[in-house]
Amino acid sequence: ALMDWGCAGKPAKSSSDQVLPENWAFTLPIQVGDTVEADLGGAFFPATVTGVQGDKYDVLFFDGDTDTGFERGMIKLLTPPKEEEVVDTSNMTPKQLKRWKKT
């Protein structure tokens, strides 16, 4: 199952799987400490999120290099959040969304 997920870029299906959007790796919220892959000129490299400023993200790459200002579409979340961590933010006001992102 892990190999299927790694090759396909999405988790293997099982009867207990939660329903995630098809592009979850590029759209679900990212938090400091999340393990990701960040796009450096067309190639994705393993990294950890070290900071979030609005809609920009800072990362620490596997080799110790750091970079700042990544847009969400340039970062691929490697592990889907646990079911209880998935929050529907579509009906939140901007103020509620800002508060939720701080937690």
Image (cartoon, rainbow, N blue to C red):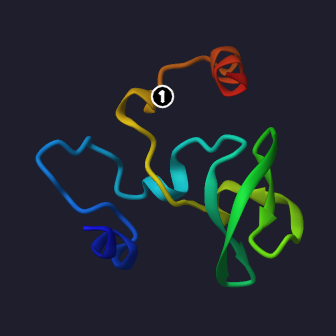
Query: Label 1 neighbourhood size at 10 Å, few (<14), some (14-19), many (20+)?
Result: few
Q: Residue 67: percent from the left, percent from the top?
A: 88, 65
For the C terminus, the image quarter is top right
**x, y (%) of residue 9?**
40, 70
Residue lying at the far bottom of the rendered structure: 42
Q: Nearer the viewer, residue 4 or 89?
A: 4
* Furthest residue toward left: 15
**Residue drawn 11% across the image and 47% down it:** 15
Q: Position of residue 57 (x, y in %)?
A: 78, 51
- Residue 68, image x, y percentages: 88, 59
- 16 left or right, relative to 65: left
Q: In the figure, is residue 46 to the left or right of 18?
A: right
Which amino acid lies under the numbered mark 1 shown in the image of this protein?
Ser
52 shown above or below 37 = above
Q: The N terminus lies in which quarter of the figure?
A: bottom left
Reply above or below: 39 against 52.
below
Rendering quarter of residue 39: bottom right
When asked about the image quadrant of residue 19, the answer is top left
What residue do we see at 67% from left, 84% from top?
A: 42
How many numbered dots are placed on residues in this image?
Answer: 1
Q: Is residue 4 left or right of residue 25?
A: left
State left or right for residue 67 relative to residue 57: right
Q: Name the residue located 63 percent from the left edge and 49 percent from the top edge.
A: 34
The residue beneath circle 1 is: 90
Q: Secondary structure at mark 1?
A: loop
